[in-house]
Amino acid sequence: MDCLFCNIATKKVSSEIVTEDEDFLAFRDIYPKARIHLLVIPKRHIESLKDIGGRDSDLIGRLMLKVAEIAREQGLEGYKVGINVGKKGGQEVDHLHIHLLGNA
Ligand code: 5GP
Ligand code: ZN
């Protein structure tokens, strides 16, 4: 399986990484739609929010905590968090990712 965001997570494809730990990676969106536009992903390949189940509750919970922590570190007072789900939901890259967008 050739997945762009798996390749970004393993550094086979370069990106502007903002922060990383064992389970998550945050990097700048290549076409930013806000002053700060980050993509936060689990390193483990999950195709879409549609594919999560009870076994993922800990990972998804920690992913949201990570997004809030990154927003704090970026100095954002307010921001938007979004997930596109499925082709019909505007998802272009089939590896679960959270858009974190903030201007202020
Ligand atoms: P989606 O539409 O799947 O929710 O969002 C995919 C996002 O990935 C888009 O905002 C797009 O700009 C971004 N993107 C696509 N290819 C690359 C890439 O190679 N590197 C980075 N950093 N972002 C990418
Ligand atoms: Zn992947």
Image: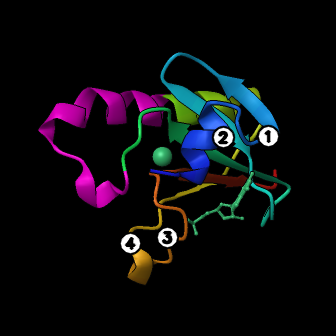
N-terminal-most mark, 3 or 2 = 2
Contact between labelled residues 3 and 1, with CB atoms less than 8 Å apart: no
Looking at the rendered structure, the kind of residue marked 4 is Gly
Image position, residue 12 (x, y; %):
70, 36
Mark 3 or mark 4: name the one nearer the start of the chain: 4
User: Under tag 1, what secondary structure?
Assistant: loop
CA distance for labels 1 and 4? 25 Å
The circle drawn on residue 86 is 4
Side of 59 relative to 33 (left or right)? left
Q: Position of residue 84 (x, y in %)?
A: 47, 67
Residue 60 located within the stretch drawn in magenta:
yes
Q: Quadrant of ligand 1?
A: bottom right
SS type, badge 3: loop
From the image, state whether disc 1 or disc 4 is nearer to you.
Answer: 1
Query: What residue sits right under mark 1 in the picture?
Result: 14
Which residue is disc 2 drawn over? Answer: 8
Identify the residue at horizontal 78%, vertical 67% (top origin): 33
Q: CA distance from mark 4 to mark 2?
A: 20 Å
Viewer-nearest residue: 68 or 44: 44
Residue placed farthest to the left in the image?
54
- Which mark, residue 91? 3
**Residues in magenta, as a range:** 47-65
Compare marks 1 and 3 and give the one earlier in the sequence: 1
Q: Residue at x 49, y 70 (%)?
A: 91
Determine the main secondary structure of the stretch shown in magenta: helix
